[in-house]
Amino acid sequence: MSIRLLSSGESHGKGYLIILEGLPAGLFISKDCIEEQLSRRRRGYGRGERMKLERDEFEFYSGVRGKVTTGNPIGVVLHNSEWEKWMDAMDAFDLKEDEAKEREITKPRPGHADASGMAKFGFEEARNVLERTSARATAAWTIAGTLCRRLLEDLDVAVRSSVTSVGPRSIGLPRSEEEWTRACSSDMGLPREEDEEGIMAIIDEARCSGDSLGGTFAISVKNVPAGIGSYSEWDRRLDGRLAQALMSIPSAKGVEIGGGFGLSQRPGSEVHDEFVLSSGLWTRRTNNAGGIEGGVTNGEELTLHVALKPIPTLKKPLRTFDVRTKRETSAHVERGDVCVVPAASVVGEAMTSLVLAQALCEQFGGDRMEDLRSRFEEHTKRTRRMFHV
């Protein structure tokens, strides 16, 4: 069975419903690990007011008993702290017309789904659109991804991230395991402390000018053996599935695997990762492929890069039009952030964990963790023998 995620909820509604189906029975889950990842998702210099108010309180309804998965669908409710302030404008059956009218959005923001969502469903204003397209939904994804991360951790597969640029300032990849550790634990997601002051300065500059900043982050996955994924059909290729999941993150506009676009500018003799013999093991001299060839892992570290555009809610709004009067005006201003790159990298870890857990459950099956683990370990040993001299 594969893992399937469904979620429901709105940014200013009661909260989010999360159903994760397909996790094997016997996987240990702790509230602490989920709270840790939700806290990391709230991190970052340049976050907005909501991150100071949102408590990310959640309840498990099913699928876990005594801190261990039962094999049944896992149900979680993530509460929105500010529901009482919005219930008159958002309630399913007892909507207060005056309050709903006050919260209407008729001035779509360039770069947001406001106008396109209105066009899709025929809404006369954008509140129904932005409530679902809000990045608040990524808190629900983070919970689901953390449950999948627990499965990967049980198999000794490690997923981590690092911010690699903010706006025009490039930081680059971590250069050591210590720098990867710092990037994961740092409030700004940066691998080196000396970069923090400069990044904070450009975020402050953007805030003062009423603007926002994008950036890039990298995802690294260690200890994935060769042979995970599939090349049999276009929609089963692991690289395509990872790219789709990462592109679903709000503001994501580009995904690279390994050397990405840069490989297109170099000859094949410099791009493809040659095999070299090292200590009795055939390994790769480089990792330009980012650990995936033909939609299947090749045993090297998985490396992915995600580019984020600046968020579309600006304190100094851009020009737009009012959908009712059809006259030019300034775009709606909803409470928002200046820079979300450190937080988005945590969501990237969650989505990567979800896809990898799906692929592993599909390939090795098993209703119980011990069955999946034994098959995974046997596969790992077999592929290692293939590369040993």
Image: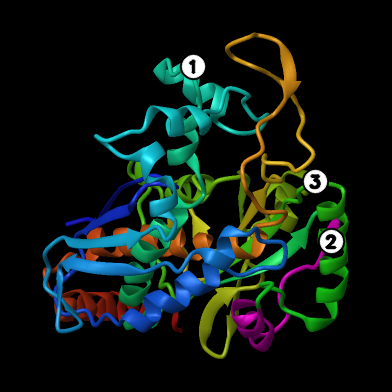
Q: Position of residue 296 (x, y in %)?
A: 42, 57
Q: Earlier in the sequence, mark 1 or mark 2?
A: 1
Task: Say which amino acid is labelled 2.
Answer: Asp
Q: What segment is highlighted magenta in the picture?
A: 168-186
Q: From the viewer's perspective, tell me whether residue 63 is left or right of residue 98.
A: left
Q: Which label sits on residue 92?
A: none
Q: From the viewer's perspective, tell me whether residue 95 is left or right of residue 24.
A: right
Q: CA distance from mark 1 to mark 3?
A: 27 Å
Quick check: 177 above or below 345? below
Residue behind mark 2 = 204
Q: Position of residue 206 (x, y in %)?
A: 84, 52
Return the residue found at the far top. 326
Quick check: 381 above or below 111? below
Residue drawn at (72%, 44%), measured in percent from left and top?
A: 264
Quick check: 332 above or below 44? above
> Which element carries disc 2, helix, strand or loop?
helix
**Where is residue 96, by image quadrant?**
top left
Task: Say which amino acid is labelled 3.
Answer: Asp
Q: CA distance from mark 1 to mark 2?
A: 36 Å
Task: Say which amino acid is labelled 1.
Answer: Ala
Residue 234 appears in the picture as rendered: no
* Nearer to us in this view, 189 or 106: 106
Q: Earlier in the sequence, mark 2 or mark 3?
A: 2
* Nearer to us in this view, 385 or 346: 346
Residue behind mark 3 = 211
Residue behind mark 1 = 119
Residue drawn at (55%, 76%), measured in percent from left and top?
A: 283
* Nearer to us in this view, 186 or 27: 186
Q: Position of residue 215 (x, y in %)?
A: 73, 54
Q: Is residue 176 magenta?
A: yes
